[in-house]
Image (tube, rainbow, N blue to C red):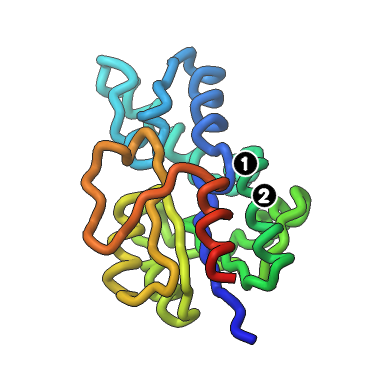
Amino acid sequence: MYKLKLGFDIDHVINLQFENTRDMIFSKYGIKLKTEMASTDAITSLVYDNDYYTNKSISDDIRKTIYDIRFQCQATPSISALRTINSLKENGAEIYFITSRRVGTEKFTIKWLNDWGFKYDYLYHTGINGKDNIPKGIFANELCLDFFIDDRYKNIVDMQNYRRNWNIGLYLIDRPWNIHKPTPTGVKRIKNFVDVLHLIKVFM
């Protein structure tokens, strides 16, 4: 019997990393960050202070923090994502996590996944230095994934470049920082993990 191969990003998809980041910035600097600016790309390009050197110091510290695996593992999971993924696994699907977290720090993510009770088959880190990552699409193509979901527009485009045929589909989950971007041809949007569960169970 064929097992569906389902891929999931981690940060901002199965966890509440944007809340973790927003709270950290307010706690350290007293800056209230709007949710739509809480993506990694936006955070590292924001102006936090009119003084160049103060702004650079804040920006560099925030960049260092958000790429720290220990900080990333402070985020709580989306309970809906946890329940959906475990239900899919229990119903015979293979679960793959493909994240831009740095290569070499997998043990921390594995502990986080296990501590929160995620059921899965494999974990892949693709991050090199915060800017240059191994394209996630390479893993998707080698694994012959049927489905993948991410919040980052660039990752979805990379996935599409490496793997054209998806039995279920390639999905961009709605987040405030991607909602106004055009949806690439062949990619679909999805609002939440309740919809993910309903979508995939049709194929099981």
- In the image, residue 138 above or below residue 120: below
- Residue depicted at x 61% and y 48%: 81
On the image, numbered disc 1 is attached to which residue? 78
Q: Is residue 120 left or right of residue 203?
A: right
Q: Is residue 135 left or right of residue 193?
A: left
On the image, numbered disc 2 is attached to which residue? 82
Residue 142, image quadrant: bottom left
Return the residue nearer the eye: 56 or 48. 48
Tag 1: Cα neighbours inside 10 Å, few (<14), some, or many (≥20)? some
Q: Position of residue 31 (x, y in %)?
A: 44, 15
Q: Quadrant of the C terminus?
A: bottom right
In this view, the residue farthest toward the bottom is 1
Q: Quadrant of the N terminus?
A: bottom right
Q: Position of residue 11 (x, y in %)?
A: 52, 47
- Residue depicted at x 33% and y 20%: 48
Under mark 1, the amino acid is: Ser
Q: Position of residue 54 (x, y in %)?
A: 34, 20
- In the image, residue 17 above or below residue 146: above
Under mark 2, the amino acid is: Leu
Residue 102 appears in the picture as rendered: no
Return the residue nearer the eye: 50 or 177. 177
Asked if the residue at tag 2 contacts the one at tag 1, i.e. Cβ–Cβ closer than 8 Å, the answer is yes
Return the residue nearer the eye: 91 or 140. 91
